[in-house]
Image (spheres, helix red, strand yellow):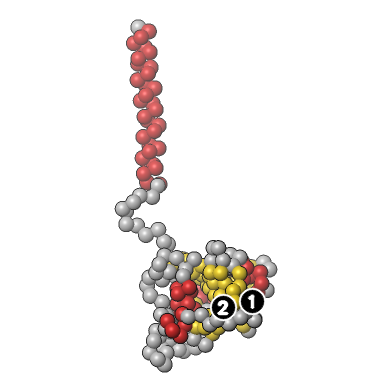
Amino acid sequence: MAARNGKNKTVRNMLLSLAVVVPVAGTGYFVLPHEGTGRDPVKTVGYQVEVASARRAAPYPVVAPEGLGADWRATSVWYRQERGEGKVWHLGFIDPDTEYVQIEQSDGPAGDFIEDSTQHAEATKRTQRVGDTVWQRYEGEKYNALVRTERGVTTVLAGTASDRRLVEMAAALRDGKSDAKPDAKPDGKTAGKPDAKASSEPDEKPES
């Protein structure tokens, strides 16, 4: 009898263990990501309403891209007062190469804001002309960036994206005050895809 009771106890313990393990394993199937599901993990956001609201509230011209292709996907947007950094506008994108690009603007002190927005990238001696605008190039371990400061506002384009994609974003920026469209250029070229000669090659100028 003792042997039979011991055997029954072992079987019962094994069944109880399975009862605990199976539901956990089943839950893991639904929680953990799986290959071959075809699901896109990037969650996109609309931003036109936020752009309009920020342009009404901000003390500077708020920029946002126009004319970018559908393979540029907005993932974050906000406008708020940041402690020590003034009124900050932010718009983040995943580019066609699945790298990150963010647009950030502030009317606060430029130094701290640039350091924060570029993830501590450092200014180089190179500038980048895009259309009529000259940007300062920054390089860092996490982000590379294009930076400009004018009329009491600092604008930063930064992220893990290539220099080419940063230039493409810079060429698409509009502040909503002009009727010109991104593709309305005298030479017929699309501003969203800047001319490689005119825009993509950096001006080798010393930092001023």
**Point 49% across, 66% down: residue:** 160
Looking at the image, which is closer to me, 156 or 87? Answer: 156
Residue drawn at (57%, 72%), measured in percent from left and top?
138
Query: Viewed as shown, does residue 67 lie left or right of 128?
Result: left
Mark nearest the camera among 2 and 1 is 2
Q: Give the CA distance from mark 2 to mark 1.
A: 24 Å
Under mark 1, the amino acid is: Asp
Q: Is residue 199 left or right of residue 80?
A: left
- Whichever of callouts 2 and 1 sits on the residue coming sooner in the sequence is 1
Element type where label 1 sits in the image: loop
Disc assigned to residue 107? 1
Q: Which residue is mark 2?
A: 126
Q: Residue at x 39, y 33 (%)?
A: 21
**Which x, y percent locates residue 50?**
51, 73
Residue 3 locus on image (x, y percent) = 35, 9
Which labelled disc corresponds to residue 150?
Answer: none
What amino acid is found at the position of numbered circle 2 in the picture? Arg
- In this view of the protein, which residue sits in the foreground, 7 or 141? 141
Q: Quadrant of residue 42?
A: bottom left
Number of other residues with Cα within 10 Å of mark 2, as a class: few under 14, some 14 to 19, many 20 or more: some
In the picture, measured across the screen, residue 150 lies left or right of residue 77, that is right
Which quadrant holds the C terminus?
Answer: bottom right
Reply above or below: 193 against 5.
Answer: below
- Considering every residue shown, the one lying at the far bottom of the view is 186
Residue 112, percent from left and from top:
66, 69
